[in-house]
Image (cartoon, rainbow, N blue to C red):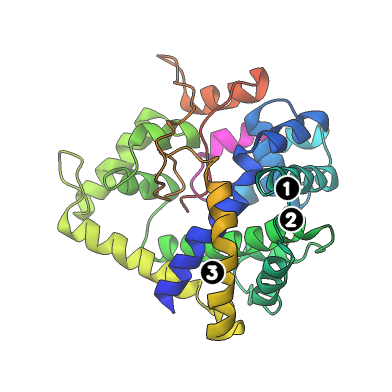
Amino acid sequence: MDALARRMWTLYEPVHSLTYFAPEARTTFEEAGLRGFWRAYFAGRAAPLGPTGPAPVVASFFGFAPAMVARALPGVWDLIPPWQALRARTTGAQAAMERLLPGHEIGPVAELLEQAIADLDVAGRVLGAANAALPAGGGPAARVWRAATVLREHRGDGHVAALVAAGLDGCESLVLRSTLDIAREDLQPNRGWTDSEWDQARHRLTERGWIDVDGRATAKGISEYRALEDATDRAAARPWQALGTEGVDRLITLLTPISKACGALLPARNPIGLHLDHPQPPIRREARSGRDPAEEATDVADDGVEVTLQGEVS
């Protein structure tokens, strides 16, 4: 069941990620009054929590530097109320899916995904619970995206729990990941950590024996990382029990072409952790020398330049 949980994640994560990468999603947020990637990101993802300030988002998103979050929240709610951000993210994702899959029958996928989340255990899962509490209205594409988002955030909450139990903080989790399969330059600027914060986290991991002095993961670090991923998979396994073997097999068959179509919009190099088979390079903005990455990141909210982001590593 744990292996199944990971396989299902690779199928629903690209669907959820439409809200970050699809041009329709960006356009919808701009029409709602949010110019710039980061305003849309924080407004859309945090909206299920209500008009919250930065502290709950730092806690639940986990991997973002507090300074970066504080530059977006709560100020974004002066531009758009949470209910409007919720509507914008659903409208954008639905439009993108309908463009990517014209004439594709996705109603059965919506039904199976909704069956998987119908009695979801959300104890201890803040983002999963907040998204699961939202109404499931709209057409089949909107329903598929909502269910994928509930599952994605439910899994992410479990991953955060595993990281906390392992004694890792947000920056340390990214530093560890950068020694394995995602480059530092694809993580640090897009999460807002300064060079000093990053180097301090690296030093702490070196002292724990998880990475060596050259910044490479040690055998212990690799083992601990695998244990974290195993714990995440175990925590994400329960939804699929509701479908049974036949239901899961049917969902895999039906969801795979949808996932591939949505995944085509993701950069091949991405901080989500998905390994894609297309050569598209990341679209990202390099930090200008001498500037705080948190300040650089929120510049995007001011001038509308596209960046690579951000499905959750956590």
Residue under pointer 3: 252
Dot 1 falls on a residue whose secondary structure is helix
Label disc, if present, on residue 98 of the rendered structure:
1
Tag 2: residue type? Ala
Mark 1 in CB contact with mark 2 (< 8 angstroms)? yes
Which residue reaches farthest top?
Answer: 289
Q: Can you say whether 197 is above or below 296 in the image?
A: below
Task: Measuring from the top left, give residue 188's x and y in whole percent.
Answer: 41, 34
Tell me if 139 is positioned left or right of 265 in this view: right
Tag 3: residue type? Ile
Mark 1 → mark 2, Cα distance in angstroms: 7 Å
Q: Which residues are magenta?
A: 59-73
Mark 1 → mark 3, Cα distance in angstroms: 20 Å
Tell me if 265 is positioned left or right of 87 in this view: left
Badge 3 density bin: few <14, some 14–19, many ≥20, Cα 10 Å? some
Q: Main secondary structure of the magenta part?
A: helix
Task: Measuring from the top left, give residue 106's x and y in whole percent.
Answer: 70, 61
Q: Is residue 69 magenta?
A: yes
Task: Measuring from the top left, give residue 244's x and y in whole percent.
Answer: 57, 85
Mark 3 → mark 2, Cα distance in angstroms: 17 Å
Label disc, if present, on residue 141 of the rendered structure:
2
Q: Which is nearer the N-term, disc 1 or disc 3? A: 1
Quadrant of the rendered structure where residue 110 is?
A: bottom right
Q: Please identify the quadrant where the N terminus is shown.
A: bottom left
Residue under the point 71% across and 48% down: 102
